[in-house]
Image (spheres, rainbow, N blue to C red):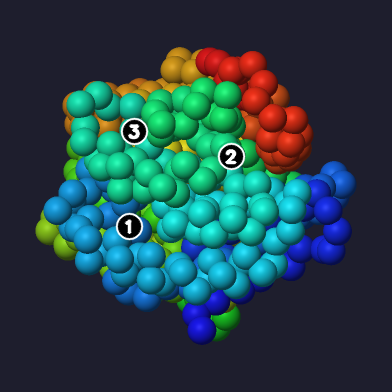
């Protein structure tokens, strides 16, 4: 029988919070849970974390659901056959999970891969909430409505929905069952903790990115014509190889940037992420865009594919990449929550990010970073050139960004938000106010 696996088995006893998602590594939700689950336990909330299994067709459907909720995707591919297979994959796993929960447990299902588990878990006596980390604020798109209609029985089984923005919530869910919760980072974790200049240089050198031969046990593969010069100004984007991250669009900015500016694109090797079947295709598109450039421009593009074999060292590498960057870009076409944005902010980096989705709640334009329409290439270039040309602006934005992260986007705040969800769901229908409503 296909069954989930425990990443963090829950302790026995009442009042537990059990998280369920689709992968233990390689994505923003997994990264969030790696920090949240132990933080909840340390704060006195018994917590566990399980990961479901799936085959290629299942994950192809769930990736399409991801795109549909972002206002893109293929509505025709969400047909009866795809939905039936989705449910067939989850049915035995729902039975197994139902045997692991008890009355009073709160089960947090994360993103569309797990939504179909809700009816069986609710029938087993668990209180079930769905934490949807994605969505769109664009009016007039049909994708979300199709998902809400397809999964109406599953949404009806929920006690609550958690979203980054109010607009991401299904309209069928009553207002008093909606919770608005912003993302969070762990400032002391390996991806964010302070690194000295020497530590940054040594970490990057171990991959071959900045010269020399990569270490035999390097946690990343570098694709580049030549190493990153020590005096280069660096623009970096850290993201999955996903079409909505527009990594190809970032590469195509390079010919219009000053000659001393180099671009580092960093993401997990897509061959190591089973729940993202589009990753290799997107990486190949990025490679093709780089290969099409004139030699001097191509030499300024560095692709960094991190491995999940050693997650701690890979996280330290991303930490070093962002700290080496003069500007961190996040040019997503849609974004539920930009965890990489907050990670750059905590490092006092100047961030140029897309004015879309959850990023609007993370960055106050002109105070903690710059926001720009990601489809407006001239505007993106103008903002990027401005940041590169004005070190004082970068310092001012970076300092303000770090202060905002400390105030609003730490793991301790997310633990408190989840505690409030547990208490609020247990108390029954309250007044219709969100738990967290982050304001700029």
Which residue is tagged 1? 63
Q: Which one is earlier in the sequence, the residue at label 1 or at label 3?
A: 1
Horizontal arrangement in the rendering, residue 100 relative to residue 355 (left or right):
right
Q: Position of residue 204 (x, y in %)?
A: 54, 61
Q: Do the numbered discs 1 and 2 sit on residues whose CB atoms are within 8 Å?
A: no
Q: Residue at x 36, y 48 (%)?
A: 151
User: SS for tag 1?
Assistant: helix
Q: Do the numbered discs 3 and 2 sit on residues whose CB atoms are within 8 Å?
A: no
Which residue is tagged 2? 159
Structural distance between the alpha carbons of marks 3 and 2: 23 Å
| Residue closer to the observer: 135 or 199 | 135
Horizontal arrangement in the rendering, residue 332 relative to residue 291 (left or right):
right
Structural distance between the alpha carbons of marks 1 and 3: 15 Å
Neighbours of disc 2 within 10 Å: few (<14), some (14-19), many (20+): many
| Residue closer to the observer: 378 or 143 | 143
Q: Residue at x 27, y 27 (%)?
A: 138
Q: Residue at x 70, y 25 (%)?
A: 407
**Hey, which quadrant is residue 24 in on the image?**
bottom right
Horizontal arrangement in the rendering, residue 27 relative to residue 241 (left or right):
right
Q: Which mark is residue 136?
A: 3
Q: Position of residue 27 (x, y in %)?
A: 49, 57
Q: Position of residue 110 (x, y in %)?
A: 52, 51
Q: Which one is earlier in the sequence, the residue at label 1 or at label 2?
A: 1
| Residue closer to the observer: 235 or 353 | 353
Can residue 155 be spotted in the picture? Answer: yes
């Amino acid at each position: 029988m296909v069954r989930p696996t425990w990443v963090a088995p829950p302790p026995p006893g009442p009042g537990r919070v059990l998280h369920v998602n689709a992968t233990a590594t390689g994505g923003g939700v997994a990264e969030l849970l790696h920090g949240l689950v132990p933080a909840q336990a340390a704060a006195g909330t018994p917590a566990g974390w399980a990961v479901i299994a799936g085959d290629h067709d299942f994950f192809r459907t769930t990736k399409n659901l991801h795109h549909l909720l972002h206002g893109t995707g293929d509505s025709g591919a969400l047909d009866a056959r795809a939905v039936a297979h989705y449910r067939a994959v989850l049915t035995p796993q729902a039975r197994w999970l139902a045997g692991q929960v008890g009355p009073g447990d709160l089960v947090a299902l994360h993103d569309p891969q797990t939504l179909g588990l809700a009816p069986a878990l609710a029938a087993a006596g668990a209180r079930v909430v769905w934490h949807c980390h994605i969505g769109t604020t664009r009016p007039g798109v049909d994708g979300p409505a199709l998902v809400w209609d397809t999964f109406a029985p599953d949404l009806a089984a929920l006690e609550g929905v958690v979203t980054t923005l109010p607009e991401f919530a299904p309209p069928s869910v009553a207002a008093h069952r909606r919770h608005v919760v912003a993302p969070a980072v762990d400032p002391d974790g390996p991806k964010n903790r302070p690194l000295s200049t020497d530590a940054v240089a040594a970490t990057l050198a171990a991959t071959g990115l900045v010269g020399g031969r990569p270490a035999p046990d390097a946690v990343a593969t570098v694709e580049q014509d030549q190493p990153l010069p020590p005096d280069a100004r660096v623009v970096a984007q850290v993201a999955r190889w996903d079409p909505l991250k527009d990594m190809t669009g970032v590469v195509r900015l390079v010919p219009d940037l000053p000659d001393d500016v180099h671009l580092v694109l960093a993401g997990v090797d897509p061959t190591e992420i089973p729940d993202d079947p589009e990753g290799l295709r997107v990486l190949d598109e990025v490679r093709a865009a780089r290969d099409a450039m004139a030699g001097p421009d191509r030499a300024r593009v560095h692709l960094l594919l991190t491995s999940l074999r050693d997650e701690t060292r890979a996280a330290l590498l991303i930490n070093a990449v962002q700290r080496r960057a003069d500007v961190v870009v996040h040019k997503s076409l849609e974004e539920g929550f930009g965890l990489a944005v907050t990670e750059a902010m905590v490092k006092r980096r100047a961030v140029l990010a897309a004015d879309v989705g959850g990023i609007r709640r993370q960055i106050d334009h002109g105070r903690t970073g710059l926001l720009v329409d990601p489809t407006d290439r001239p505007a993106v270039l103008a903002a990027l050139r401005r940041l590169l040309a004005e070190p004082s602006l970068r310092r001012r934005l970076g300092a303000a960004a770090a202060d905002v992260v400390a105030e609003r986007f730490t793991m301790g705040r997310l633990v408190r938000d989840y505690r409030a969800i547990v208490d609020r769901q247990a108390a029954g229908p309250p007044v219709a106010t969100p738990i967290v409503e982050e304001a700029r």
